[in-house]
Amino acid sequence: MLPMPAADLDFYSRELAPMLPPVVLDFHTHIWQSQHWRVKPWETNAAGAKYMVTTETYPPAQLLADAASSFPDRPYRAVTFGYPVPVVDPVAEDRYVVDAARRHPNLYPLLLAGKPLGVSATEYRRRLDESRAYGFKVFMNWLGDDYGDLRLTDMLGEAELTVAHERRLILMLHVPRSGRLADPELQADLRSLAGAYPEAQFVLAHCGRCYLPAEMRRAVACLPDLPNVALDTSMVMEPLVFVILLREVDSRRLLYASDFPVAAMGGRRVRIREHWVDVVQDRYPESAWRVRAPGLPVIPMAQEIAYALREAALAIGLSDERLGELFHDNGMNLLRRVRTCP
């Protein structure tokens, strides 16, 4: 790990470190090995395959190194899981993640799960007993931005939901459909499932994929009365998204999250017309919604997410205590509820 440049360390010390709790918990990270993949997605012609070109191997040591670069003076914990798309062997990915968590007690593993995988409730219980995982990262049966018209009930079956309810598991969802969380059918599914399985702990990755204010504005009304639905901040860097959300939803339901390895890139996700674009330094590979800018002065995207939370907190008058909870206590409270033993 290279030392942080003096200018970057000054920015971190001045703008970010004062708001952080003694320990940072990152609620959304990946680790993987490409030997568990049947094919590299971006080398195919499948729809959406070049949506997110990333590193082929991302071991736990690199995750922890990237975290140390983003939060150099803080102990770091992370919820982590494999690569949840159709090109992988999900069982091999789970083994890799669980083994990493056994070697690194500051990692909290989730297993890949979902209706398309056809796993029984009995088998899920066995895997959970063996792994002591904290829940499921719901499998995405598509590549990139080819979201189609899937419903949550196509992604989650009775087996996943029953076991999650029994054990108060984390159910990490990357929601489908082009309308994101604002889609009426998706909202109806979320309301139905959260009500039918009240002990399951649903976490909407990327704030329900609402990276931009207009998206959150259309989506937020469905959230206030769903107490077992939380949202993670992974790759959301627009402060106004958090302002809109926190005006309607208790801050204790928002979880700091990065999406490492993607958030290890130096740069920022910005709005261009009606879509987001990642503006990054020129050392990162080309990708569908990525623009490379040589010589751009940047900080890691993991820090940009934290900075956006700080700006939102200032805008709405969120207390320092509540802001600090976003970076640790909110997530730990969910993890502590999980029944990791049968």
Image (cartoon, rainbow, N blue to C red):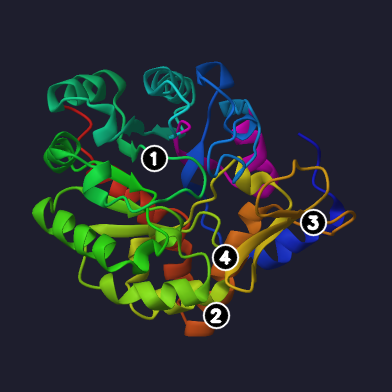
Q: Which mark is residue 19?
A: 4
Quadrant where the image shows the C terminus: top left
Circle nearer the viewer, 3 or 1: 1
Q: What residue is rendered at 43% in x and 72% in y?
A: 216
Q: Is residue 143 magenta?
A: no
Query: Which numbered disc, 1 or 2, marks the residue that appears first in the sequence?
Result: 1
Q: Could you tell me if the residues under marks 1 and 4 are in contact, i.e. CB atoms within 8 Å? A: no
Query: Which numbered disc, 3 or 1, marks the residue that appears first in the sequence?
Result: 3
Observer able to see residue 246 = no
Q: What residue is rendered at 54% in x and 46% in y?
A: 259
Q: Secondary structure at mark 1?
A: loop
- At label 1, the amino acid type is Met
- At label 2, the amino acid type is Leu
Mark-to-mark CA distance, 3 and 2: 22 Å
Mark-to-mark CA distance, 3 and 1: 36 Å
Circle nearer the viewer, 4 or 3: 3
Mark-to-mark CA distance, 2 and 4: 11 Å
Query: 46 above or below 266?
Result: above
Mark-to-mark CA distance, 4 and 3: 17 Å
Q: Residues within 10 Å of mark 1 (few under 14, many from 20)?
A: many
Query: Which numbered disc, 4 or 3, marks the residue that appears first in the sequence?
Result: 3
Q: Which mark is residue 140?
A: 1
Residue where numbered disc 3 is placed: 8
Region of the chain picked out in magenta, as a range: 62-83
Circle nearer the viewer, 2 or 4: 2
Q: Residue lying at the far bottom in this picture: please name it.
A: 316
Residue where numbered disc 2 is placed: 314
Circle nearer the viewer, 1 or 2: 1
Task: Judge from the rendering whether residue 45 lies leftward or rightward of residue 122; answer left or right.
Answer: right
Picture coordinates of residue 55, whole percent (x, y): 66, 32
- At label 3, the amino acid type is Asp
Mark-to-mark CA distance, 1 and 2: 35 Å
